[in-house]
Amino acid sequence: MKKTVVVTGAGTGIGQAIAKVLAEQGYSLLLLGRSLSALESTQKTLSVPETHKIFSCDIREKDQIRQALTQSGIQSLHAVIANAGKGGENQYSEEDPWQEILDINLTGSYYTINECLPYLKKDATEFKKIVIISSILARLGVPGYSAYCASKAGLLGLMRSLASELTADKILVNALCPGWVNTAMAQEGLQGFADALNISKDEAYGQAMSQVPLGKMSEPEEIAQLVAFLISDAQTSFTGQTLDINNGALMP
């Protein structure tokens, strides 16, 4: 019987790459995201697309997560990949997106994991897995990104607490902190950097990569392959850990 995995934010970027890699490895996927059309695009690229299910779902709404899980008809889950998130700057003002960013990145991940827990606990495999996608900005302060930094740092606290709490159920919980990854979100960030400094996007890329020892971004597929290892049967010892994948940009 195929192992079932939930992936949130599966319509684009890292989430889409995770879905592709896990589908190639034979998992049955339940893909959640706000944009149904983006999820449909992802599904079409997957191995045996008809074996995977998609649901438009706002993870800020726990009832929507619960409904998606119920409608999917799944009985158990091998793993949950809490990837969905929102980036961007924020400044304290009437239009400050602070609450929205925290609600999606931190509270949404908390809701997702807890709604999935009963299904994880029912799974027949000895070790079940939760992987949370955080960010290098969980470890670094960046001007103008207080909500994003705070929410991503909060995910690491959530991960450690859950890892301790769920050992008796043999549910292993870990987090990834990617640095620059070649996604649409990263490209938008580079364009914003370029606009702010009145330079070209290529110049902005050069300046950003000058701070990265390997001088490059990661590709989404690299993140996906690390996720695949963390949820594999070969991995039974990592829990409560933060794995930094950032081309040397931070060496804690």
Image (spheres, rainbow, N blue to C red):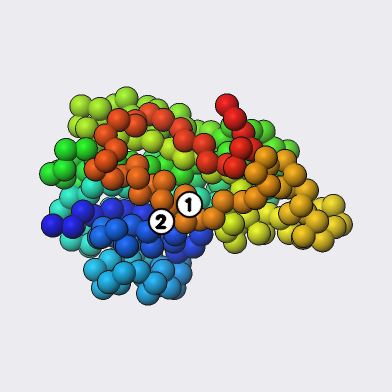
Q: CA distance from mark 2 to mark 1?
A: 9 Å
Q: Is residue 73 left or right of residue 173?
A: left
Residue 65: percent from left, percent from top? 32, 54
Is residue 69 visible in this depiction of the protein?
no
User: What number is the disc on residue 3?
Assistant: none
Residue that label 1 marks = 222
Q: Amino acid at mark 1?
A: Glu
Which of the two labelled residues, at mark 2 and mark 1, occupies the earlier sequence position?
2
Q: Nearer the viewer, mark 2 or mark 1?
A: 1
In the depicted structure, whether residue 76 falls above or below residue 176: below
Q: Nearer the viewer, residue 80 or 212?
A: 212
In the depicted structure, whether residue 1 falls above or below residue 90: below
Q: Nearer the viewer, residue 214 or 31?
A: 214
At numbered mark 1, what does the secondary structure look like: helix, strand or loop? helix
How many residues crowd around disc 1 within 10 Å: few (fewer than 14), some, or many (20 or more)?
some
Mark 2 in CB contact with mark 1 (< 8 angstroms) = no
